[in-house]
Amino acid sequence: MDLRLTPEEAAFRDRLRSWLGTTLPTLPPKPDRDDWPARRAYDTAWQRLLFDAGYAGVDWPSEHGGLGASPTEQLIFLEETAKARAPYVGANFVGLLHAGPTLIVEGTQEQRAAHLPRILRGDEVWCQGFSEPDAGSDLASLRTAAVRDGDAYVVNGRKVWTSHAEVADHCELLVRTDPEAPRHKGITWLILPMDAPGVTVRPLRTAVGSSEFSELILDDVRVPVANRVGAENDGWRVAMVTFSFERGTAFISDVVESRNLLAETVATAKATPAPGGGTLWDDAALRRDVGTLAAEVSGLWSLIRKNVSEASAGMIPVQGASVFKLKFTENRQRIGDLAAHVLGRASLAMSGPGGHVVEDRVNTLAFTIAAGTSQIQKNILAERVLGLPKEPRWT
Amino acid sequence: MDLMPSADQRDLRAGLRAWLADAWDAERLRAAAAVPAPPFDRKAWKALADLGVLGLTLSEEDGGMGLGLADAVLVFEELGRALVPGPLVGTFLAAGLVPGAAEGDAVVAVVDTGEAVAVVEHPEAATDVLVLDDSGVYLLAPGDVAGPPAAHPLDPLTPVAPAASIRLDGARRVGDAADAARLRRFGRILTAALQVGVAQGALDLAVRYAGERVQFDRVIGSFQSVKHLLAEALVRVDLARPAVLVAALTVDDPGSGDPGEAAATAKLLADAAASGNGRTGVQVHGGMGFTWEVLAHLYVKRAWVQETAFGTAAALAEELAAGIG
């Protein structure tokens, strides 16, 4: 056991740092939060910069155009880019982290050739059509129907929580192809071109006030059978292969951000006069809360290192990833509460000085819901790790 | 960077775990806790020392195993998990300073003069008291430090006596101020490792019970409310364990991190895991959890003992807060 980087890893880090140092100052200003075409342009331009510098698809195998980096190098890449405040993966998220890796494992030669290079270069943006109004935590109950008609599927239904749908070129879509089969057995994974007739995107306003997500209405949309990934009715398994990509590296940039938020809160407390004289930082209870949250952030970073070590040893850190998500999301929400407490009534606007902290606090309401609610995560840990009996099912 | 135990480390841990499962099984713990003032089992202490665990980090020419603190925390987690009684941390810190400590012939309690209320654990078993002071490390005889033992110690397996008065003039000085700081840090990390073990042991016991106990015609572990309690306990211990390991590795490899920050983090998270999981362990056992017979109470009590040593939650958090910004 050791904490050191190998000379190769240190060299990788140094090259990356130097590239970030020369590249980041040349970036244009970030676009407005609600200007989606501009956001797509910004995010894909960043992806193109990464591609040209050889950093696109850090975790993708090299035979598919990626960097084929080791889990530790992936950690370094995510840590360094976050610390340098490089742009986030943004609109490239689904393509790079979900759809692309799925095509690598399950796609045909034609499907890979059509999409993988374009995703890596930032030429193609993907969105995810998994959740439905009546299929959230219980995803396998999804009902969007696909009926075979010649060389196409005719798709009807609704999807929700589809990020970047307004500007996406393709959607990874889960549909029900066999309504008679058991829930998990009648699902198929399709590549949906977003410009197909019958696709309507209706932006959903989130609690933050932005249109991060959309609702997708599919009305007699014809999707070529050639766009099917994996076999018909095998889509649940195809969707689940993404779990095998777990390297313990998700949320690395978010933990860096948690640290930044804590440091910023301390700075604010030290600069804010307290009613009875001195500053807010003279409050021992506040310092104690900050110290406790800082210990948790530091513990989360150690857990990342442990999960990445497992991945380096060829294991999939399933338990560690679930534990991480539960703790990280809860910790970040408490950091938001603490930051707001320090801001006091300056925390009443999501704009102006301190506004980003307030926006982050609102945004993190979604952290314990997205990608598996904390309650579902606890069920999973209790059943799959601790071996407790499954919940009785009602179907 | 690699936080996976090596084959040797896995063997060390597995061997000790198997030995402890036999030497300190539930019946043995129950019997030890049954009498009001259990006599210290010197034979068991010697047997434990014979495994080499107390002199683990001493060099081989000094009769140790020449291993690092990272190996020691793997061992101490197992000792905590098995609720092994005795001044483990004090004797480990004294190995190399007190003849016979590594061999199990000397039993060494540790007292830190920085604590607001100083207490000697295992006062009657102790042959020596190691005193950690800002000015250095000292040795005193238990009779010089310990007052009369408490009639009802919180943890029946950790007898305690208030430290009457600690007079360092005339005490044998065995280390300087830097040694004292180093031993405090080691003590903090090793106590954190014990706490991770306590947290895991309490969770194991509760999970087993939740899978057996039937109410409303179902095992109680099938209820989400119980599952979530146990999953939260798993999160606590799985967060603390890598933090303890990283703290030990940071000590073993100077320059690989900030050992002060890492040690405070480790202790704070491990204390929260041990006391939180100890409480969960009692709660999941329901009424039986409040009996003397079921071992659940021993975990939470040991957690409460150890969370007072080498840095309380408030002091650790204050220390960490001072390091930000």
Image: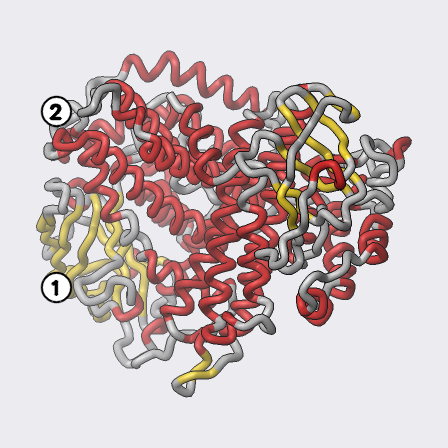
Judge from the rendering whether residue A258 lies leftward or rightward of residue A224; answer left or right: right
* Kind of residue at disc 1: Asp
Residue B237 spot, x, y in % from top left: 52, 51
Quarter of the figure with residue A31: top left
Visible in this render: residue B276?
yes
The residue tagged 2 is A352
Give the letter of the chain under mark 2.
A
Q: How is the image coloured?
A: secondary structure
Is the C terminus of chain A in the top left, top right, bottom left or bottom right quadrant?
Answer: bottom left
The residue tagged 1 is A220
Q: Identify whether A103 is placed above or below A238.
A: above
**Residue A85 got which mark?**
none
Judge from the rendering whether residue A355 lies leftward or rightward of residue A25; answer left or right: left
* Cα distance between the residues tagged 2 and 1: 46 Å
Residue B27 spot, x, y in % from top left: 71, 71
Judge from the rendering whether residue B243 lies leftward or rightward of residue A378; answer left or right: right
Q: For the residue carrying disc 1, how many other residues have a C-alpha within 10 Å: few (<14), some (14-19), or many (20+)? A: some
Judge from the rendering whether residue B51 lies leftward or rightward of residue A97; answer left or right: right
